[in-house]
Image: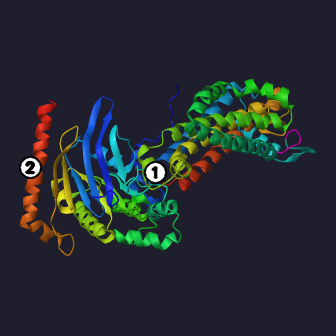
């Protein structure tokens, strides 16, 4: 794989907070268009890894490159957090509009409606952020992150705080949105099912300091299949079982190493 | 420490009708609570009035405690022209009050504006906070009357020293509140803005300042309060027309009923202005208390 095609390149990346090494060393190349899911138990440093890719943290060792250059927050990557992090002083539409404004995009009104419709939201642009449900807020956060045509979308457990039904709906929509836009996605989760459902590739991280314990391509159809049908495939169950096993093994090691 | 007697019996958090214009019609329970509170306030006012009346009659010394009727009479006298004398010291009560309110308005506007700028700078520039914070705290600890003498020496006895006094007195509460809110801007929202590509100035304008607005508003209300309590001090010298000048003159001639009238004028207008500010706050900051 030549570096020109790689959306994300991690080379011997390690990050420490003081004496504690949170993650690494990790070397990983994400080709453009891939949907990579990072899975691991809590505290394994998967969020730190995402923050390194976003440019919010600098690696203690090694290099991080996105699109061939060192990452800078707000350039080249959209970001969705676990909490929606909407600005309450802006309306729902205003939140999306702000992203378009920062990107210097003109004729924003129509684009806002379009982006909100893209994540399944209609007639909410004028509403206040606290007047819509948590699931809708997270949809707005995704629309806001997609507003700027960045090649990369980073998501840090975006559905963890939602109820099961809302989570499933948003997973389906994200799967569709990522197929529609063709963006490279790096998605962090602790849910094995979410990883298999969303990913075109799953990387399991070991307990702290997080290292790659398993790197697996997900050869499941990405379009033209109903979610229930996908979950019903024998291959789906097999992948789930394999990844689940790897995640549990990593967690066991963690308990053995650091009581 | 005095205990506040006007605290409503119901817990404030359980009252959705307060400060929530979008909440629609308040629930019957909340409406009942509001009515009860209004009744409580009316009863307490009535009790105060009766106590005042009784005290005035027992003491029988109008220079010590003027009767309510005497104060009412002075309200009429100072608001009209009697025997060729216009109001009090040649000005109607409304004019005295108007001049004082104008001073309060200009003084607090300058103070709030200055405090806002200073607070944002203090909250964003580290070394500036280290340098300026003790100075602001120092000024805040001074009674306004203490530095008024200095302003008299510098600016004479006309309008200038009074406006300086009110501005300097109103600045610290806004500066301190703004600096604290700007400094402690939530990392989550700042990061969200940076992830959208916002630069330093855009983050300040679109996230840090709007996020600080509730605290800034609280600071502004405090500032207006400080300006209010300082205006009487500012008007002790060459303060006519002005409520402070009126109170000062009335005290010299032992017109206690006029003193009390002046206190009422300033106190009631203060309540009114605070109510206006609170309404503006609800309008301008609908997200207060939500996230």
**Residue sitting at x 83%, y 45%:** B92
Image coords of residue B258 (percent x, y):
77, 35
Instruction: Give the residue furthest to the bottom.
Output: A224
Q: Nearer the viewer, residue B18 or A17?
A: A17
| Residue A254 seen in this snapshot | yes
Q: Is residue B248 above or below residue B185?
A: above
Task: Name the quadrant containing residue B236.
Answer: top right
Task: Give the alpha-carbon distance from disc 2 to disc 1, as whole Å.
Answer: 38 Å
**Region in magenta:** B88-92
Q: Nearer the viewer, residue B143 or B204?
A: B204
Q: Is residue B247 above or below residue A236?
A: above
Judged from the image, the secondary structure of the residue bearing numbered disc 1 is helix
Mark 1: few, some, or many residues within 10 Å (few <14, many ≥20)? Answer: many
**Residue sitting at x 20%, y 76%:** A224
Q: Is residue B234 above or below residue A119?
A: above
Chain identity of mark 2: A
- According to the picture, the residue beneath numbered tag 2 turns out to be A245
Q: Nearer the viewer, residue A185 or A9?
A: A9
**Residue sitting at x 63%, y 42%:** B116
Would residue A150 be counted in the magenta stretch? no
- In the rendered structure, the answer to whether residue B116 lies left or right of residue B160 reads left
- According to the picture, the residue beneath numbered tag 1 turns out to be B194
- In the rendered structure, the answer to whether residue A181 lies left or right of residue A42 reads right
**Residue sitting at x 33%, y 58%:** A7
Judged from the image, the secondary structure of the residue bearing numbered disc 2 is helix
Q: Which mark is residue A204?
A: none
Q: Nearer the viewer, residue A4 or A197?
A: A4
Q: Is the same chain shared between marks 2 and 1?
A: no
Image coords of residue A233 (percent x, y):
9, 68
Task: Name the quadrant containing residue B126.
Answer: top right
Image coords of residue A37 (percent x, y):
23, 55
């Amino acid at each position: 794989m030549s570096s020109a095609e790689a959306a994300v390149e991690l080379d011997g990346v390690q990050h420490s907070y003081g004496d504690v090494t949170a993650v690494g060393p990790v070397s990983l190349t994400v080709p453009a268009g891939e949907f990579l899911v990072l899975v691991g138990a809590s505290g394994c440093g998967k969020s730190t890894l995402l923050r390194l890719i976003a440019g919010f943290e600098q690696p203690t060792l090694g290099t991080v490159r996105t699109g061939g250059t060192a990452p800078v927050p707000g350039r080249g990557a959209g970001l969705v957090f676990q909490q929606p992090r909407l600005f309450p002083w802006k309306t729902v539409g205003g939140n999306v509009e702000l992203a378009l404004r920062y990107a210097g995009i003109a004729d924003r009104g129509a684009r806002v409606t379009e982006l909100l419709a893209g994540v399944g939201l209609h007639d909410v642009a004028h509403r206040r952020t606290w007047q819509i449900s948590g699931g809708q807020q997270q949809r707005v956060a995704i629309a806001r992150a997609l507003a700027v045509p960045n090649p990369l979308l980073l998501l840090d457990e975006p559905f963890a705080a939602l109820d099961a039904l809302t989570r499933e709906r948003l997973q389906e929509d994200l799967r569709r949105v990522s197929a529609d836009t063709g963006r490279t996605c790096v998605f962090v989760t602790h849910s094995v099912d979410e990883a298999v459902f969303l990913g075109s590739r799953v990387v399991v991280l070991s307990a702290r300091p997080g290292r790659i314990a398993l790197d697996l391509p997900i050869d499941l159809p990405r379009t033209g299949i109903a979610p229930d049908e996908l979950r019903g495939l024998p291959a789906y169950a097999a992948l789930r079982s394999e990844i689940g096993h790897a995640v549990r093994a990593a967690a066991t090691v963690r308990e053995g190493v650091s009581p | 420490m005095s205990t506040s007697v006007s605290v409503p019996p119901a817990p404030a958090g359980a009252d959705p009708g307060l400060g929530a214009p979008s909440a629609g019609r308040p629930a019957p329970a909340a409406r009942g609570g509001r009515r009860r509170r209004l009744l409580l306030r009316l009863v307490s006012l009535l009790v105060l009035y009766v106590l005042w009346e009784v005290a005035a009659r027992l003491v029988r010394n109008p220079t010590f405690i003027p009767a309510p009727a005497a104060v009412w009479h002075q309200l009429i006298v100072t608001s009209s022209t009697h025997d060729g004398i216009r109001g009090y010291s040649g000005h109607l009560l409304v004019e005295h009050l108007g001049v004082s309110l104008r001073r309060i308005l200009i003084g607090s506007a300058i103070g709030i504006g200055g405090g806002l700028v200073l607070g944002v700078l203090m909250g964003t520039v580290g070394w500036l906070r280290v340098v300026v914070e003790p100075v602001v705290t120092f000024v805040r600890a001074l009674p306004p009357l203490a530095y008024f003498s200095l302003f008299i020496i510098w600016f004479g006895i006309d309008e200038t020293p009074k406006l300086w006094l009110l501005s300097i007195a109103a600045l610290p509460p806004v500066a301190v509140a703004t600096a604290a809110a700007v400094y402690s801007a939530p990392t989550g929202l700042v990061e969200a803005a940076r992830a959208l590509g916002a630069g330093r100035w855009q983050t300040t304008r679109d996230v840090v300042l709007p996020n600080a607005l509730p605290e800034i508003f609280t600071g502004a209300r405090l500032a207006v309060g400080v300006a209010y309590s300082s205006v009487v001090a500012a008007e002790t010298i060459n303060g006519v027309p002005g409520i402070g000048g009126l109170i000062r003159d009335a005290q010299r001639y032992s017109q206690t009923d006029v003193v009390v009238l002046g206190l009422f004028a300033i106190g009631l207008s203060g309540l009114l202005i605070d109510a206006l500010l609170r309404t503006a706050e609800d309008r301008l900051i609908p997200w207060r208390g939500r996230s």
